[in-house]
Amino acid sequence: MQRKQTRTVHVGGVGIGGENPIRVQSMCNTDTRDVAATLAQIRELADAGCEIVRLAVPDDRAAAVLADIRRESPVPLIADIHFDHRLALAALDAGFDGLRINPGNIGGEEKVDVVVRAAAERGAPIRIGVNSGSLEKDLLKQYGGPAPEAMVESALRHVAMLEKRGFHDIKISLKSSSVLKTVAAYRLMSGRVDYPLHIGVTEAGTLVRGAVKSAVGLGILLAEGIGDTLRVSLTHDPVAEIGVAYEILRALGLRERGPEIVSCPTCGRTEINLIRLAEQVEEALRGVEEVFTVAVMGCVVNGPGEAREADIGIAGGRDLGIIFRKGEVVRKVHGDKNLLPEFMKEIEKFLEERRG
Ligand code: SF4
């Protein structure tokens, strides 16, 4: 996979673009004014592997608590601002590491001057975020709707306002809830600029639908080498977005974090409650950062063989679980209720041995 060469920008200590890994980010859905709740969610996201968190800054009251949040945050923070340049200045004053703001929407050249100067002084990049739902009227008319070309042109107008001021610390996103339009827009943009691209399918939907749409859209782009940071947007707890993001990256061999859990679909040979066991194993391993492969398979006839590549696995029999490593049987566990605890013990043992 040949990655498109992009410039590097830094959001706090996190490099995006160039040779940096593809960064995983998300956005809090707490009320930003609720400092405790927002910080709790930032920490949860960070623990799940989120490297940059964005917060909505809708008003002065939200802006007033940004410094308190920034001081305690374990990861760099981006302020998401619409229209009001004063909120952008307040976020930069509060030590925020980046802005998501479209300069064409903040009320004129003078305001753009002030925001760009402040961002440059603090080394904070600006993400231009174009959304198919809020394109300029003239572009909608010219392209007959929110076409990918219209999205790209809209973003380039905002980019030009920053470049005119010598500001190049830019990232760009072009989001549409249509997977195909999103892909087309990013392809076009990738051919036009070398700024890092923040990729995502917006308003993708609830957990399963949203994960599938994101995986298809982001998967196509990443496989073509497009995309430097990503956000999976789900109508769900944002912490789930991080797991989906890493699974997309893992599937493409781009990044790994935590165990890969392979499990069989079950069939007429399955004699244990495998679906529940697989879910329990997944839950028990949540938060583990080490990279290894765990298999949860329905039968002893095919399970270990099918999951030969797994570091450690379990295969069900009649009221029995067979634990195997790299396809070789190491132990048998009797009794349905013992399968999970005994398997977890074996996983712990495997990890301890591997750690040396
Ligand atoms: Fe069926 Fe066994 Fe394959 Fe699972 S591992 S799908 S139980 S044959």
Image (cartoon, helix red, strand yellow):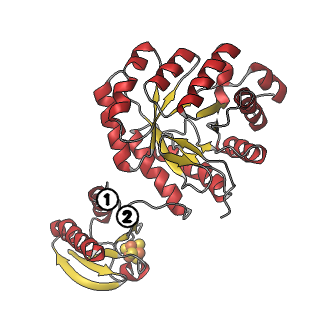
Which residue type carries mark 2?
Answer: Pro
Residue 72 in percent (x, y) is at 32, 34
Identity of the residue drawn at 39% across and 75% down: 310
Q: State the residue position of label 1.
A: 288
Dot 1 and dot 2 residues touching (CB under 8 Å): yes
Whether residue 218 sits left or right of residue 316 in the image: it is right
Query: SS of the residue at dot 2?
Result: loop
Whether residue 66 sits left or right of residue 318 in the image: it is right
Whether residue 309 sits left or right of residue 275 in the image: it is right
Which residue type carries mark 1?
Answer: Val
Whether residue 179 sits left or right of residue 45 in the image: it is right
Q: Sort mark 1 into few (<14), some (14-19) or many (20+) by Cα contacts within 10 Å.
A: few
Q: Kindly indicate the quadrant of the structure image that contains residue 119.
A: top right
Q: State the residue position of label 2.
A: 259
Q: Kindly indicate the quadrant of the structure image that contains residue 61.
A: top left
Q: State the residue in front, 331 or 13.
A: 13
Q: State the residue in front, 330 or 44.
A: 44
